[in-house]
């Protein structure tokens, strides 16, 4: 063998070795044939048709194109389904009405799909030209029934008392395969906690014991690879309370637990607390170290002119007849001739006087700058504003200041009071 022949043989050998390496790295780039599928796992619905799309391409002249479909299950040998050469299809007679292919398109149609069709489908493409090029892909097919709408059952159906009773929610589904359960509360997933647990398949939610915080809108979401359905919302019955008992009134001055009422006024008290079922309310009056029930219901009207003493103690009692719990709110009613209105008037008078005297004090510091405005006044820097000898000038300045607050009835009223005090008309 000559050197040229040896080098040619060596080059061919090396080239073939390089091509094998590229085949491993580039999946058929040297052969020029490539077979692709959109997904290696396809989920189908029993009784419906399933389409397995396949794409292939090559960069050589082909005289014949052969396509073969095989089917395999775990631990079994692949089974021939159908094949084609160019546009001629050769099916397995056992499956000729179930599988369809339209060459040169390599995609496969399965119709109808059954549970026995679940497994791996292998497609192989051969290209005959200067040589034979081959490439293949595998697709896993799963078959499921769609999920039917779940129904949630609650036990006990009559409800449970907080901190005493337990509750179980069960999700029931009539149809569907490979089901996955998820519990939702107020449209958010429910997680395991110290009082919440799930069954092995997650189709049962157990709450022990129930609390007020467990109240909400529950639903069961069931999924599988081909569908999902959610149950109707249910709100389990949980008995709780009373919580947050308080007493309010439609009038009168309230300071803490004391209500001040004017003589002659009728005041209406309201008693409320968070509870289910709603509480029953009782009003109790305490007189001379004795107590007695004066009314039932959430409202109590007290007519101040009919109260025999100026200070009276009352109590509102709330009772939940299912939980067996009760709560009490104590308060005192004081009947006074001063009343809330006069107290409010005195407060407004005090605030107005405080604002006026603060303004006058500030004006006293600035009077020396007003000589040009009031040239007839002889006022020194430290001369008191309310000095008797300068009362005419002071009132004139106060009048000037009051023009800046034309809408203030309080300032105008106090301005008149100042004039009376210093004897100016």
Image (cartoon, rainbow, N blue to C red):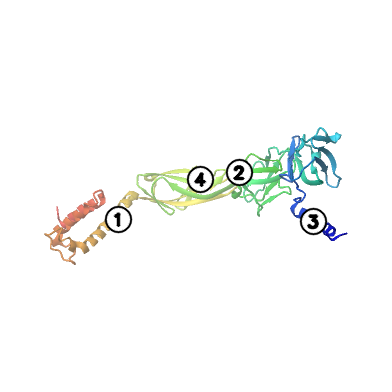
Crowding at label 2, few (<14), some or many (≥20) Cα neighbours within 10 Å?
A: some
**209 relative to 31 in the view: left or right:** left
Question: Residue 15 shows which numbered tag?
Answer: 3
Query: Residue 390's x, y, as percent?
Result: 14, 61
Marks 3/1 in contact by CB < 8 Å: the verdict is no
- C-alpha distance separating marks 2 and 4: 33 Å
Q: Nearer the viewer, residue 26 or 62?
A: 62
Figure check: 136 above or below 14? above
- Residue 155 seen anywhere in this rendered image of the structure: no
Q: Dot 1: what SS?
A: helix
Mark 4 or 1, nearer chain start: 4
Q: Dot 2: what SS?
A: loop
- C-alpha distance separating marks 1 and 2: 53 Å
Residue picked out by circle 1: 351
Residue depicted at 33% across the width and 52% down the height: 343
Q: Dot 3: what SS?
A: helix
Residue depicted at 18% across the width and 54% down the height: 419
């Amino acid at each position: 063998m000559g050197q040229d022949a040896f080098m040619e043989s060596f080059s061919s050998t090396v080239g073939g070795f390089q091509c094998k390496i590229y085949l491993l790295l580039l999946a058929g780039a040297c052969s020029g044939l490539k077979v692709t599928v959109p997904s290696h796992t396809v989920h189908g619905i029993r009784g419906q048709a399933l389409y397995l799309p396949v794409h292939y391409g090559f960069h050589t002249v082909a005289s014949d194109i052969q396509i073969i479909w095989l089917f395999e299950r775990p631990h079994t040998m692949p089974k021939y389904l159908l094949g084609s050469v160019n546009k001629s299809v050769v099916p397995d007679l056992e499956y000729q009405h179930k599988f369809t292919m339209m060459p040169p398109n390599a995609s496969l149609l399965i119709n109808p799909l059954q549970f026995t069709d679940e497994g791996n489908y292998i497609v192989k493409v051969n290209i005959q030209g200067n040589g034979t090029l081959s490439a293949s892909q595998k697709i896993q097919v799963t078959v499921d029934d769609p999920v039917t709408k779940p129904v949630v059952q609650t036990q006990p159906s009559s409800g449970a008392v907080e901190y005493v009773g337990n509750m179980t929610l069960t999700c029931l589904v009539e149809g569907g395969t490979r089901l996955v359960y998820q519990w939702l509360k107020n449209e958010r997933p429910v997680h395991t906690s110290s009082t919440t647990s799930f069954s092995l398949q997650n189709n049962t939610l157990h709450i022990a014991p129930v609390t007020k915080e467990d109240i909400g809108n529950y639903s069961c979401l069931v999924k599988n690879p081909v569908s999902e359905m959610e149950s109707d919302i249910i709100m389990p019955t949980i008995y709780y309370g009373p919580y947050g008992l308080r007493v309010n009134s439609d009038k009168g001055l309230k300071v803490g637990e004391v209500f001040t009422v004017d003589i002659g006024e009728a005041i209406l008290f309201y008693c409320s607390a968070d509870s289910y079922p709603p509480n029953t309310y009782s009003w109790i009056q305490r007189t001379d170290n004795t107590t007695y029930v004066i009314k039932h219901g959430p409202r109590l009207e007290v007519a101040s002119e009919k109260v025999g003493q100026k200070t009276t103690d009352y109590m509102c009692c709330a009772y939940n007849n299912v939980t067996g719990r009760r709560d009490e709110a104590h308060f005192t009613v004081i009947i006074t001739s001063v009343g809330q209105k006069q107290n409010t008037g005195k407060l407004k008078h005090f605030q107005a006087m405080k604002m006026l005297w603060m303004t006058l004090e500030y004006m006293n510091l600035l009077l020396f700058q007003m000589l040009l405005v009031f040239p007839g006044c002889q006022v020194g820097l430290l001369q008191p504003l309310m000095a008797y000898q300068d009362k005419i000038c002071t009132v004139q300045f106060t009048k000037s200041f009051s023009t800046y607050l034309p809408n203030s009835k309080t300032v105008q009223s106090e301005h008149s009071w100042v004039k009376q005090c210093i004897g100016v008309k």
